[in-house]
Image: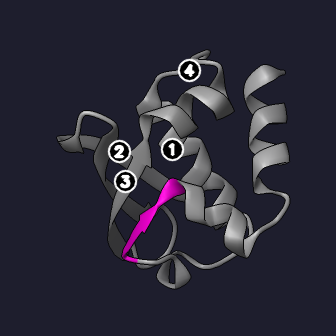
Amino acid sequence: MARIIVSTLPPVDDNTWKYYVEITESEGSGSKTVHEVTMDKEYYQKMSDEIILPEEFVKRSIDFLLKRENKDSILKEFNIRQISNYFTEYEDEIRKEIIK
């Protein structure tokens, strides 16, 4: 189990948001990793229908990754859209989770 903290950073531009994500193991060592995640406004709107806040979308996306890989394997910098390049089921799974 891990604790995920998402903090909003100044946007890259009018269409791209930036987040600082801290993942801390809640059991055992308590080790943590930090990640800089960007997300395009258009992608967020398409994927979430704006049902949840952008920060919650990022958090759920990180949780999706943690169910499939170790926190140390998650890229230190990436655009949220890239997840589907590694996990083809990402977009379907995240949409189902949001809309349920």
Q: Main secondary structure of the magenta part?
A: strand
Q: Label 1 belongs to which residue?
A: 59
Q: Is mark 4 on a helix, strand or loop?
A: loop
Between discs 4 and 1, the one toward the N terminus: 4
Q: Is there a contact, CB below 8 Å, between mark 2 and mark 1?
A: yes
- Give me the C-alpha separation between circle 2 and circle 3: 12 Å
* Residue range highlighted in magenta: 76-80
- Give me the C-alpha separation between circle 3 and circle 4: 17 Å
Q: Label 3 belongs to which residue?
A: 38
As displayed, is residue 83 above or below residue 11?
A: below
Q: In which quarter of the image is residue 14?
A: top left
Q: Label 2 belongs to which residue?
A: 6
Q: Position of residue 22 (x, y in %)?
A: 33, 59
The amino acid on which the numbered mark 3 sits, given as a three-letter code, is Thr
Between discs 1 and 3, the one toward the N terminus: 3
Q: Is mark 3 on a helix, strand or loop?
A: strand
- Give me the C-alpha separation between circle 2 and circle 4: 14 Å
Nearest to the observer: residue 41 or residue 74: 41
